[in-house]
Structures are given as C-alpha cells and as structure tokens.
Amino acid sequence: MSENMEQFSPELPSSSPLIPSLPDDVTVDIVARVPISHYPTLSLVSKKFRKLIASPNLYKRRSFLGITQHRVYAILRNRSYSGDCRFYILHRKLDCCSSNHHRLVIVRSLPPMSYRASFASVGSKIYVFNEVDALSIDCNSHTVQPISDMPQRFSSSPMSSIVANVIGGKVYLIGDSAVVTSGGMSWRKTVMVLDTETQTWEPVVMVKQDMRVGALWSGAVVMEDKICMKGYRNKQRSFVYGPEGNKWESMGEVMNSKEWGEGACVVDDVLYYLDCSEKALRAYDPKQSRLSVVDGLEEFLACECVMSELPNVVKSGEKKMALFFPKKHDGKEVICCAEIALERHQGGEIWGKVKWCDVVVEDGLFDIVNCVAVTV
C-alpha cells in the first residue's frame, strides 16, 4: 500500500475487508471515483459500506484525486405541520425502468430548521443562521455542529431581516438591530463576519443609522464580490454592500427595476431568475449592465412552468443550474426540478438547454423555502 493510499484507508478490521477479493485501500479508491448520487444505494450494501460512506477519509480521498461534484439540497416546509423546514437532498434513482430518475429525499439525521433561517454554503458545509444562534452542517457526514462565540450585538433584541452570503470563504451576516438612544429608537445595519477557515468571528461592523432593508426583503446574491440585497416591493430599500471598505450604495437601475428577488442565483457572475409573468429565464450581466432573456427555453417554460409562483434556482455545477418549481401533474400538485446547461454564444447571447426534468416530490403540500449547493 502506498503512503498516499494508507492515509486515506478507513478504520475497519483487517480480518473483515469491505470486498473479500480486494484490499480495503483499493475498495476506497474505487468508491471514491463513484458519483456521489450512488452513495445512498451503496450505503445499503452492508454496515461496513455505510460506515465507509459516512467516513471523512473517503471524501479526503476524493479531494486528493481531484474528484468533486455539486450536491444540491432543497429546504422544504411541510404545510401540514408547524412550519418547521427539513433538508432534502437531490439524488438520482438507479432504477432505469422508473419514469423519474431524480428525487428529493429527506435527510432525517438533520434537525428541523426555522423557515426564517438564512443559509450559506462554503465547500462541503452549509451554514445556518437564525435570529439567536448559528450552526454548520457537514454535508459529507450530515452532522451538525453549533457555531459558538457569536459577537455581542448592540441591542437586546435579536437581529432581524438576516441575510447570509459568502465572499472569499467568509460568511457575511447582515441584519437590522434596534438601538435605543437618547432620541428614541433607531435602526442600524449590523454586519458580522465568520471566517470559515479559522471558524472565528471578526469584529462587528456598524453602519450609519436608519439604513434598513426592511422587515421583508426579497433576496440577496453575490456578484463581483459585492452583496446585492433586494427590498421587497420597495426600491428605496435595495442596496449593494461591498466588504472592501465597508461601502454601501444604491442598487443599479436595471436590477432595481425588476422583481428578481428570492429564488435567484448567480452562475459565473451572471444573475439568473425566473420571470413568472413572462415565462422566461432572465439573465443580468453586471459587466455589461444588461438584462436579457436566456434563449432556447421558451417552449419548455411555456409548457412546464404554468403555475410556478414560487420557483427557485441554484447553481448545480459548472455552467449549470437546477430549477425547482411547483406544477400540476396527473391532477395533483407536485414539485419538479429541471437541470439547465448554460452556454454563452459569441454575440453575447446566453442559451439554455434542459438536460433533464423530473417530478422530485409527488406530494405538493410543500413550500420551497430555499436551495443550497455544496461541493463534495
């Protein structure tokens, strides 16, 4: 066994190999090259395989081999229950005879989340922030760790209207804090920064008073290393925050004039969102300050997204996105997902091609709260 292979070997009894005819290091090397979408099925082979799939050593081996892929999660709220949200993972079914090869499957080892939580991903981890606490999820093992030592806020009330976004491996947590002064109560924007490399918080940054996105914000994305926050039906409460120099500025006229809001995503520094009223996927390129329609999807969107009032898109790989949307199927409400490949042509036009589209949740009594993609 080579030195590199030895350091990634799972901790299993030598007398009981994973595959009797193969050394464990060879088995680990083989499994590391298998697409992660097959791991749920592999974990059913035996207890030892289940332990291997959950072992950090397997993912270290994948990283060493340069084998990574995007894994997509959807946070769904069940309308039949109290409103708590659960994590669902998107993976492919191996039954080739099935009409649907993709499903959202609940991750039962992860606890329910508040529908008010904000989510941000860095590498293979998802960070979850509520009004009073924070935690991180390791998406290799689906284990949860609390994030401690959050900075003291400048008011006794919880920070509201929380936005969490990632720039350069740091999570920027932005929200409103009520501050009592001699002149009464005022609102101040609070910026807290978590360095995910060191797992430490940086000093709290306060910006000028009475600058508030509002109790309801529509969405936030990162473009060109700046956080763009869209106010909910209020153009005066839409801002762009640049961490370098702690600068705030008004959102550009083109972005501010459109209701891109919640459910948008950024792929290769271009903003994408589904325009439900026009049944079109729109793209905004900040370098050209131009808003355009993604070509090649007209027939698909007109046919599939008839009742998509709450769509959600998330980056699902290089030049790819996953579009989640509700629709009517066989007389009942369901949730569908389509993977769309994106390609920029020489003239600057962006074209989309649907790689697949499946019903991923057959019971439509769910709301799509958010979608997050990680790299594992």
Image (cartoon, rainbow, N blue to C red):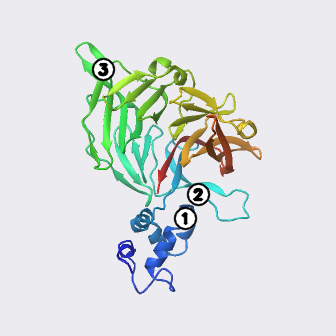
Q: Look at label 1 and name its amino acid.
A: Pro
- Asked whether, in this view, residue 342 is left or right of residue 198, the answer is right
Q: Residue at x 38, y 78 (%)?
A: 2
Residue toward you, 80 or 136: 136
Q: Position of residue 281 (x, y in %)?
A: 64, 35
Q: Residue furthest top?
A: 183
Amino acid carrying mark 2 in the image: His
Q: Amino acid at mark 3?
A: Lys
Name the disc covering residue 208, or none.
3
- For label 3, count other residues whose C-alpha is less than 10 Å away and answer few (under 14), some (14-19) or many (20+): few
User: What residue is at 40 percent from the left and 44 percent from the top?
Assistant: 128
Instruction: Tell me if 156 is positioned left or right of 211 in this view.
Output: left
Sequence-first disc among 3 and 2? 2
Asked whether the viewer can see residue 99, the reply is: yes
Q: Which residue is mark 2?
A: 91
Q: Is residue 46 above or below residue 360?
A: below
Q: Secondary structure at mark 1?
A: helix
- Answer with the quarter of the image where residue 113 lies: top left
* Earlier-in-chain disc, 2 versus 1: 1
Residue 218: x and y, percent?
51, 29
Contact check, label 1 and label 3, Cβ < 8 Å: no
Secondary element at tag 2: strand
Could you tell me how far apart the alpha carbons at marks 3 and 2 are, in whole angstroms? 45 Å
CB atoms at circles 2 and 1 under 8 Å apart? yes
